[in-house]
Image (cartoon, rainbow, N blue to C red):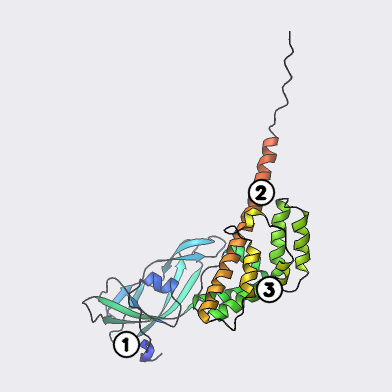
Amino acid sequence: MSETVSGKAQPKEEPITWEEFLTSMPPGRVYSINAGEIFPSANGPAVLVSTLKLFCDSEHCSKICFFDSSDPTVYLGADKFEKKFITYFCRHCKKTSRIFAVAVRWEKDSKSSAKTLTAVKLGEWPPFGPHTPTKVNALIGSDRELYFNGRRSEALGMGIGALTYYRRVVENQKNRIIDEITKVCTTLNAGTEILTELEAAKREIRFTAAVDKIKAAIPQVLLINGQNPLTLLHGALSEGVHDKTDGECLEIAMSIRIVLSELAERMAIAVKDESELSSAVKNLLKFRQPPVAPISKQ
């Protein structure tokens, strides 16, 4: 990589922390980093990178964990960018890793005596993008890679790409989504009308046409802010891409992803709560006392 990595792109006006830079910012952009204390070393000025909080998807963890760098010292170039790989390992399972490729340069802020860094994230592995909840993974089935591409596009601000990926996921997984809703309706004894309409909806090819088949109300527990999630998705998927700006497509894509995630969460909770309630009732019935005989009058 040449010295022009500082490029014509300008860093953000307000410096961000190392943790924000590594966990929340997409590759390919220039940022000012509030690096904390810069100290001298045999290899020149250096800074320590902070511990990160990341989702560990190992079977042992499957939650947000602390990740520590195997080499927390970053050496800084005084007038050129220094390139470095920073590898983090989960502190708990010691197995899951995240690798960041960065370029950093030390410079003195022209407006003050404060010392800041200019940094570019060149890439990371696994690829940049927020964690996808397990319940959503179960709902999107074989289209996980399409969904992850949508998440990465959304994170990078590419609205048309994100919307296109999410639309394909929902259309492709129409029957899986309807099957999961049917499972909840059956568990909650929602009635034959909605079950019949859900089955008819599965025979439609497109998601929007399938939703048009469903007239009966779905269970209250699945409503999102009082609205039918299928109707919300129907409205978003009915929007055209070609007549929308990238920003408008990004807004629609985010809405699809949020509604889909919330629907997956509500379906999982509904089935789990009903199952736990049925189990609790059965357990309590085991301890039901025999009826007390009436007291005879003297």
* Residue 225 located left or right of residue 89: right
What residue did someone put label 1 on? 80
Is tag 3's residue or tag 1's residue first in the polypeptide sequence?
1
Nearest-to-viewer mark from 2 and 3: 3
Report the number of numbered marks: 3
Q: Can you see residue 138?
A: no
Residue 136, image quadrant: bottom right
Percent coordinates x, y for residue 70 in the rendering: 41, 71
* Earlier sequence position, callout 1 versus callout 2: 1
Front residue of this view, candidates 180 and 239: 239
Q: Quadrant of the C terminus?
A: top right
Mark 3: which amino acid?
Glu
Q: In this view, does 46 lie to the left or right of 91?
A: left
- Residue pointed to by mark 2: 274
Marks 1 and 2 in Cβ contact (< 8 Å): no
Amino acid type shown at disc 2: Glu
Q: Residue at 72%, 15% (x, y): give it.
A: 295
Q: How crowded is mark 3: few (under 14 residues within 10 Å), some or many (20 or more)?
A: some
Can residue 129 be spotted in the picture? yes
186 or 127: which is nearer to us? 186
Q: Which secondary structure, mark 2?
A: helix
Using a 10 Å C-alpha cutoff, classify the residue at mark 2 as few (fewer than 14 neighbours), some (14 to 19) or many (20 or more). Answer: some
C-alpha span from label 1 to label 2: 61 Å
Question: Disc number at residue 247?
Answer: none
Q: Distance between the residues labelled 3 and 1?
A: 49 Å
Between disc 1 and disc 2, the foreground one is: 2
Question: Circle 3 — which element?
Answer: helix
- For the residues bearing labels 3 and 1, Cβ distance under 8 angstroms: no
x and y, in percent, of residue 91 in the image? 45, 63
Q: Nearer the viewer, residue 67 or 181?
A: 181
Say which mark, if any, is on residue 171.
3
Classify mark 1: residues with Cα within 10 Å, few (<14), some (14-19) or many (20+). some
